[in-house]
Amino acid sequence: MKKVCKISGKEFEISDKEIALCKVMGVPLADLSPEEILRQLAANRNEWTLYKRKCDATGESIISAYPSDSQYKVYKNEFWWGDGWNALDYGREYDFNKPFFEQFAELQKVVPREGTSVFRSENCAYNGHVRESRNCYLNGLAYRNEDIYYSYWMTNNKDCIDCYLLKNSELCYWCIDSADCYSCTVLQEGMNCSDCHFSFQMRGCKNCLFCTNLVGKEYHIYNKSVSREEFEKKKKEVLSGSYKAFKAAIKEFEKIKLESIHRFTHCINMENSTADHAANLKNCDDCFEVFTSEDCIHALSAEDSRDVHNCFSAGWPGCDRIFTSAVTRGSTEIAYCSYTFFSSNLRYCDSSNELHDSFGCIGLQHKRNCILNKQYSKEEYNDLLPRIIEHMKSTGALPAGRQEWGQFFTPALSPYAYNESAAQDYLPLSENDARKLGYRWVEKDKKDYLQSSISEIPDDVHNLTSDFTKEILVCEECSKNYKVHPRELDFYKKQGLAIPRNCHICRHRTRFKTRNPLKLFERKCDKCKVQIKSSYNSKRPEKVYCEECYLAEVN
């Protein structure tokens, strides 16, 4: 079935699988394109922006995803998850004279919110979405890590800085979409590599520099075999601690990456599936960063799940029948929800833990049969819910008279400004375009930025003493202030890396731009001309090979 997006005006397709799931779950078909749905979902997740503020329960100073002037009540994590308050105290009757989203917005303003998502971790206060980690600083999405800094989507790593989607690795810098690596620098699409630098699409390699598409090689520069002495000499020149040398190496890396052969997608063990950066999928379509899942469509970031459609982050542990929702863990039969943990049969709920058979609730735990945080009997709930759904169908409360039922939370209900959220990473907008779509936008007043405490950052990191960590630096891109952490300085010296000239957010966005968009295009293999579906569109300059041609070339 083909439909036209009510926001973008672009045509999109709804598959038979999605039609079947909507019928089973009793929800309407989407009237927005997958891209616009993802934008709304990602706008409900703040993974990087942190503020200092007071806990509204204890008065303590805390680190929070919400600024001090936020309209929301915010509790420190320990208090929010504790027994010192009851979300049912904020319950209210459903008002059939008001649109549902208006009532939900009123509930949002009174129900306390969790300060940040940091659990079972030590010395990790300055992070967003971190679990079971130690000594981590300014990361987003991290699980079981130690001593990592300024990185995103990290699992089981140690002593790593400025990385993105890295697993089971140590002593890595600026490594992207890589796993099982040791002491690597600017490595993208690397697996089981050690001492590899400024290289792309490497497997099982050691001691390589400026290489691409190698498997099981050692001591190579520009894909040519060299002696150990030649390699060490060149490596010392490139990783000398000089910023000029590092910039030159980055430029060279970008050149060899562009000129190399590219796989049409980065997937392993796929059955009847289309995806990028995925593995072990069956009957999945248009999925990204999805692993060991089945029958998923338009999903970003999922694992061990089934029937996840139009969702952002589902799994860990696995989920089943999730529709148009953001951040779902161990749950089933969820639609139009945000931050749902170990729950079932929910619609329009936020920040729920072990909540079941409920509608329009915020912050509830270990409850059942609730609407707008008010407790009902099973019979009362089953009687009231269909009436609410019919009311949502009739309100026409959205632009162009669109009904509320079947829509995710509108931009006005997002607890974050667009440029605070993950949406700005995946689907960046200008301030003007974000506001046109109804999203908020925050920008720090430039007059609040401080001038650098030094006239110039020395080129060679080895000339710096520990006193340098006290200096105030200014980002060359956005003018935001930043500092160098003492452990960070030690890492740079040990690895022969220069002091970065941009703040960690700008570096993060630079890494994001090195990856392909969350979109698959019809094109032909540049070698055999077979038709393929790739994250590289046909107008890009890279040489893109189908799986068969790529493996024949590399192996």
Image: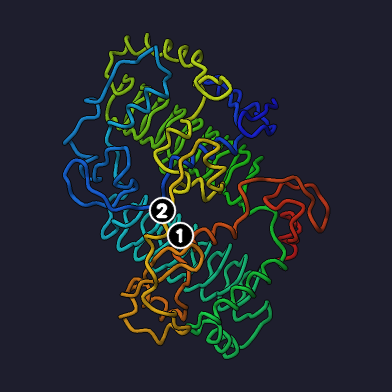
Q: SS of the residue at dot 2?
A: loop
- From the viewer's side, name the closer residue of 549 and 52: 52
Q: Is residue 8 left or right of residue 313?
A: right
Residue at the image position 41 percent from the left and 35 percent from the top? 338
Residue 288 against residue 342 in the figure, above or below: below
Which mark is on residue 48?
2
Instruction: Point out the tag, 1 or 2, that comes first from the N-terminus.
Output: 2
**Kind of residue indicated by mark 1:** Ile
- From the viewer's side, name the closer residue of 476 and 517: 476
Q: Which residue is mark 1?
A: 505
Residue at the image position 43 percent from the left and 18 percent from the top? 99
Residue 536 against residue 295 in the figure, above or below: below
Task: Confirm or deny contact between disc 1 and disc 2 (CB under 8 A).
Answer: yes
- From the viewer's side, name the closer residue of 446 and 235: 446
> For the view shown, which residue lies furthest in the right direction?
529
Residue at the image position 21 percent from the left and 52 percent from the top? 61
Q: SS of the residue at dot 1?
A: helix
**Kind of residue indicated by mark 2:** Trp
Asked whether residue 555 is in view, the answer is no
Asked whether residue 95 is in view, the answer is yes
Residue at the image position 36 percent from the left and 71 percent from the top? 472
- From the viewer's side, name the closer residue of 298 and 431: 431
Q: Is residue 526 left or right of residue 42?
A: right
Q: Residues within 10 Å of mark 2 (few under 14, many from 20)?
A: many
